[in-house]
Image: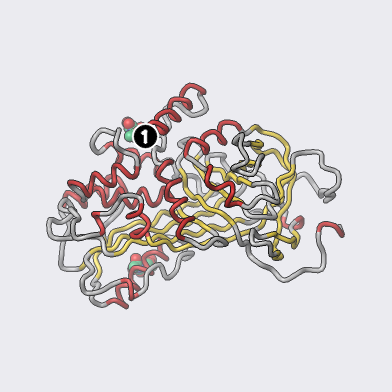
Amino acid sequence: MLMVGLISLLLLRVCGCRVADAPDDVTAEFSVRLYHQLQMVGGEEDNIIFSPLSVAVALGMVELGARGSSLEQIRQAVGYSHFREDEEFSALRNLTQALAADEAQYVVRLANSLFLQTGVSFSPDFLRLMKHYFHAEAETVDFSEAAAAAEHINTWVQNHTESKIHDLVSPDDFSSMTRITLVNAVYFRGSWKNQFRPENTRTFSFSKDDGSEVQTLMMYQQGDFYYGEFSDGTTEAGGVYQVLEMPYEGEDLSMTIVLPRQEVPLATLEPIIKAQLLEDWANNVKKQKVEVYLPRFKVEQRIDLRDNLQQLGIKNIFTKDADLSAMMGKELFIGKAVQKAYLEVTEEGAEGAAGSGMIALTRTLVLYPQVMADHPFFFVIRNRKTGSILFMGRVMNPEVVEPFDHDFDSV
Ligand SMILES: *[C@@H]1O[C@H](CO)[C@@H](O)[C@H](O)[C@H]1NC(C)=O
Ligand SMILES: *[C@@H]1O[C@H](CO)[C@@H](O)[C@H](O)[C@H]1NC(C)=O
């Protein structure tokens, strides 16, 4: 696994696709493993959304306070084994700094914190490092007052995510035994470089993988995007599939959509998704004119990091075997770790958005490659310079709308 990571970095340097001094994300392999883990434990028809970068940052905070095998398990699982000691913290800081942008282009809010039982105090060194690497404060809360603790944490999260993420934790998450909780939330709002015109959005049928159909709002545009058709050379992925990369304003971030053929369930494509393949897609899509049909969608998911990270080998920090001695030096383990991610994809933009005028919505005359996301697809939102993965997920169920009185065919 380590080899794959290194090879991909070498390839990238050789092809010069990246700015030479941009930090490279080494956690792609970990991100993909976590995706497959969530896919395995979730329902077959469920959407997935999580933020690998945000999980890596949260784990980095814990790692600062970890020693012994607790530390080793995190380094191993996340992919830092080849780093010099502590180098991952500087890497994480660089990756999050690379996201600081002009807020006219996009807004990213990583809300990560450790909440510790009041009355016990963190080591000053640990607090200093938290501030240095993560610009974060560790907070205190009285977990024995479960309802008040949950409310306090939820307000903190709301404050850090433009009020988009509510109810991250509930009073049931805590007991008088709780000493520390890892809180991890992320909110993203981006403007497309090429915006969709709201007047081109129509209700449209979306065919789910279970064979049923739902009505959803489908956005449409013809524009210049990065596009490619791929095949893994076997029938495993259902033959040829499409990859469309759509940059956000500023072009630092982009969303890549991976769409199997209409009759091929997404589950057939998912097993081939690997860290190396994400790189291959990014390096092989070509700028060209594409016709895009994409549902307007909103996905949100709360993930129990404790259960899922244990499956990926990060076990100790959640058990009595934890060694978090650099954090406070007493018997301490992470009782609860949750992530909630929220992503909204819309036309973003409206009147006055640059566009190419009214478009004839004919489905018979196809001049350009057509990406018709009217069935389940996989997506990734990445920093195009660093490769770091802000979000990864899939849409199996778009938002359902009441049937409307017009559709593409009647235009
Ligand atoms: C992070 O950025 C700093 C300053 O650009 C650089 O010196 C350092 O090597 C980077 N760290 C990593 C691990 O890439
Ligand atoms: C949330 O923000 C409000 C207003 O800025 C502030 O008064 C409050 O203390 C914050 N709450 C938490 C838990 O951070």
Q: Nearer the viewer, residue 74 or 339?
A: 74
Quadrant where the N terminus sits is top left
Residue bearing the label numbered 1: 2
Rendered image quadrant of residue 193: top right
Q: Position of residue 310 (x, y in %)?
A: 32, 55
Q: Nearer the viewer, residue 108 or 324?
A: 324
Q: Is residue 263 above or below residue 275?
A: below
Please tell me which residue is depicted at 63% across the width and 52% down the height of the picture: 265
Asked if 305 appears above or below 73 in the picture, the reply is: below
The residue at the far top in this view is: 14
Q: Amino acid at mark 1?
A: Leu
Position of residue 162 in the picture relative to residue 206 (left or right): left
The residue depicted at 49 percent of the width and 64 percent of the height is 164
Image spot of residue 258 (x, y percent): 61, 45
Residue at horizontal 77 percent and vertical 38 percent from the top: 368
**Is residue 135 shown to the viewer in this render?**
no
Location of the C terminus (image quadrant): bottom right
Q: Position of residue 24 (x, y in %)?
A: 41, 34
User: 54 or 68: nearer the eye?
Assistant: 68
Quarter holding residue 306: bottom left
Q: Is residue 248 above or below residue 333?
A: above
- The quarter of the image that holds ligand 2 is bottom left
Q: Is residue 234 left or right of residue 50?
A: right
Q: Which element type, helix, strand or loop, lies under badge 1?
A: helix
Q: Quadrant of residue 281?
A: top right
Residue sitting at the far front: 235
